[in-house]
Amino acid sequence: MQSIFDKHKRKYGYIKVIIELKNRGYQVNKKKVYQIIKKHNLKAATKTKEYKSYRETIGKAVDKLLARVYMNDKLYINMDTDITKFRINSGKLYLPPIINFYTREILSYKEGYYIPIKVGNSK
């Protein structure tokens, strides 16, 4: 197993090691191979993933109905929501508040481990 790890530059995990051993003609038990790899600390070297952001537009742009004029003289005319995602130890937590642009206050919110389908007066 050490030679397999060295030959493939420590890129093989225990499943690929099992496949390579079977290709070489050995009949092996996957649990035993896993125990031996763990005992001898033959871990596959993992690469860190780079952050890749998609810079081009996806889909088509929505018309600007408010034209960025959020202030209004009447209460409850311009309201909006935005879903914020928090990563926590037990998974992801979503927070969609409903914001009144006239008073700049949060009217309602509902946190949860899933994205709520209906927020406010959605149709």
Image: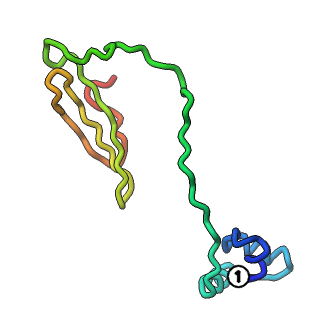
- Above or below residue 46? Residue 21 is below
Instruction: Identify the residue shown where x is 35% and y is 56%.
Output: 88
Residues 123 and 86: in front is: 86
Using the image, determine if residue 70 lies above or below residue 21.
Answer: above
Corner quadrant of residue 59 = top right
Q: Amino acid at mark 1?
A: Asn
In percent of width and height, residue 123 lies at 34, 23
Element marked by disc 1: loop
Is 122 situated above or below 22?
above
Quarter in which the N terminus is drawn: bottom right
Seen at 16% across and 21% down, the residue is: 102
What percent of the width, then of the height, locates residue 73? 14, 12
Rendered residue at 28%/26% (across/down):
80
**41, above or below 69, in the image:** below
Is 51 or 102 nearer to us in this picture? 51
**Image quadrant in which you'd find residue 85:** top left
Q: Residues within 10 Å of mark 1 (few under 14, many from 20)?
A: few
Q: Is residue 11 left or right of residue 96?
A: right
* Total numbered badges shown on the rendered structure: 1
Q: Quadrant of residue 39?
A: bottom right
Along the horizontal axis of the image, is 11 left or right of 85?
Answer: right
> On the image, numbered disc 1 is attached to which residue?
29
